[in-house]
Image (spheres, helix red, strand yellow):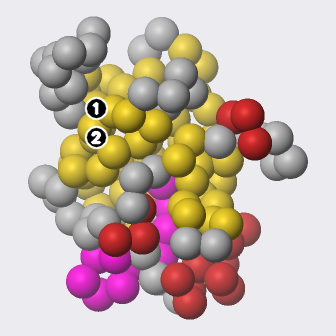
Amino acid sequence: MPLSRIVMRLARNPGTEFAGGDDHRGYSLIAPLTPDGHLDEAAYAKARGECTVRRFAPDEDPSDGRLARRGARWFFDYEAGDTEDDEPVHRLGEHRFAVGEYVTVTDEDGRPLTYKVVEVRPVD
């Protein structure tokens, strides 16, 4: 089952301190994708332990976690058993992960921020 590395960087978010975006803030995740670029739910069920996320920003240490799913809801989980640190991703199961697409992640402060997919490649 092939996994993909997906890199998303903070896009323009008018009305926030990131109005112009920030290429140094974002996420790198490892997940299985279907041929058309959507999350592969069946493959995820078999490889959930390998599906990871890393949040990065210039003013903080990287945060490593996992891609998780509860029912139809996908989220980034940084500490197992603690729901306080979960970052929900708006309709993640419906997103197409292709360069140029946009994804909304609710940050640790509860605000939705938009990220742009800048890289999708197979994991070596």
Whether residue 6 is visible: yes
Task: Check disc 1: other Cα within 10 Å, few if <14, some if 14-19, many if 20+.
Answer: many
Q: Are marks 2 and 1 in contact (CB under 8 Å)?
A: yes
Q: Residue at x 43, y 15 (%)?
A: 58
Q: Amino acid at mark 2?
A: Tyr
Asked whether 33 falls inside the magenta stretch, the response is: yes
Judge left or right: residue 90 versus residue 96. Answer: right
Could you tell me what secondary structure mostly forms the magenta stretch? loop
Q: Residue at x 82, y 48 (%)?
A: 80
Earlier in the chain: of badge 2 and badge 1, it is 1
Q: Nearer the viewer, residue 28 or 85?
A: 85
Query: What residue did someone put label 2 on?
Result: 115
Residue 42, percent across and down?
Answer: 56, 90
Task: Check disc 2: other Cα within 10 Å, few if <14, some if 14-19, many if 20+.
Answer: many
Q: Which residues are magenta?
A: 29-38
Residue 84, percent across and down?
Answer: 73, 34
